Image: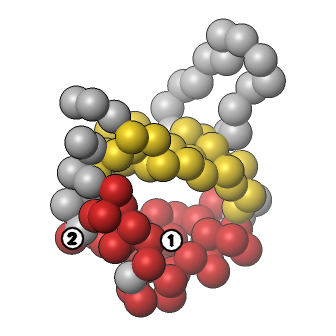
């Protein structure tokens, strides 16, 4: 069963966030993740609008997603994301 990592991100420092995003993309790929969406136009259909940027990454398993999130390499860049943006993130199990 695959798992989706979903992030709603409001970016406060585009330049700093770009450094994070570049490194995160490399680590996602290294952990078997596939970026399905990042940025792009988002239209709220019901409820409050989501963050400025939506990020969706598919991992083959929850274990793969957690290995990415818990890796020393990700932990070393997470502080860049935290200082350059505000985010809400989720893991959602899928059956595809």
- Which residue lies under the disc numbered 1? 20
Residue 32 in view, yes or no: yes
Q: Quadrant of the C terminus?
A: top left
Where 79 falls versus 2 (above or below)? below
Residue density around tag 1, few if under 14, some if 14–19, many if 20 or more, within 10 Å: many
Mark 1 or 2, closer to the camera: 2
Q: Specify the quadrant of the image occupied by residue 68.
A: bottom left
Q: Specify the quadrant of the image occupied by residue 13.
A: bottom right
> Which residue is at 19% across, 61% downward?
32
> Which residue is at 55% across, 39% downward?
54
**Residue 34 screen position, x and y as percent:** 25, 49
Q: Which mark is residue 95?
A: none
Q: Is residue 68 left or right of residue 41?
A: left
Q: Quadrant of the N terminus?
A: top left
Colour theme: secondary structure
Q: CA distance from mark 1 to mark 2?
A: 15 Å
- Which residue lies under the disc numbered 2? 30
Residue 55 in view, yes or no: no
Q: Secondary structure at mark 2?
A: helix
**Residue 24 screen position, x and y as percent:** 40, 68
Q: Choose the circle earlier in sequence order: 1 or 2.
A: 1
Where 11 falls versus 30 (above or below)? above
> Which residue is at 56% across, 76% downward?
78
Residue density around tag 2, few if under 14, some if 14–19, many if 20 or more, within 10 Å: few
| Residue lying furthest top | 45
**Residue 64 screen position, x and y as percent:** 28, 64
């Amino acid at each position: 069963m695959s798992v989706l990592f979903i992030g709603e991100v409001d970016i406060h420092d585009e330049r700093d966030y770009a450094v994070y995003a570049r490194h995160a993309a490399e680590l996602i790929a290294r952990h078997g993740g596939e970026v399905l969406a990042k940025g792009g136009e988002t239209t709220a259909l019901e409820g409050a609008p989501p963050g400025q940027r939506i990020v969706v990454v598919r991992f083959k398993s929850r274990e793969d997603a957690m290995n990415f999130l818990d890796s020393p390499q990700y932990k070393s860049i997470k502080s860049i994301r935290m200082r350059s943006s505000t985010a809400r993130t989720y893991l959602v199990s899928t059956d595809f």
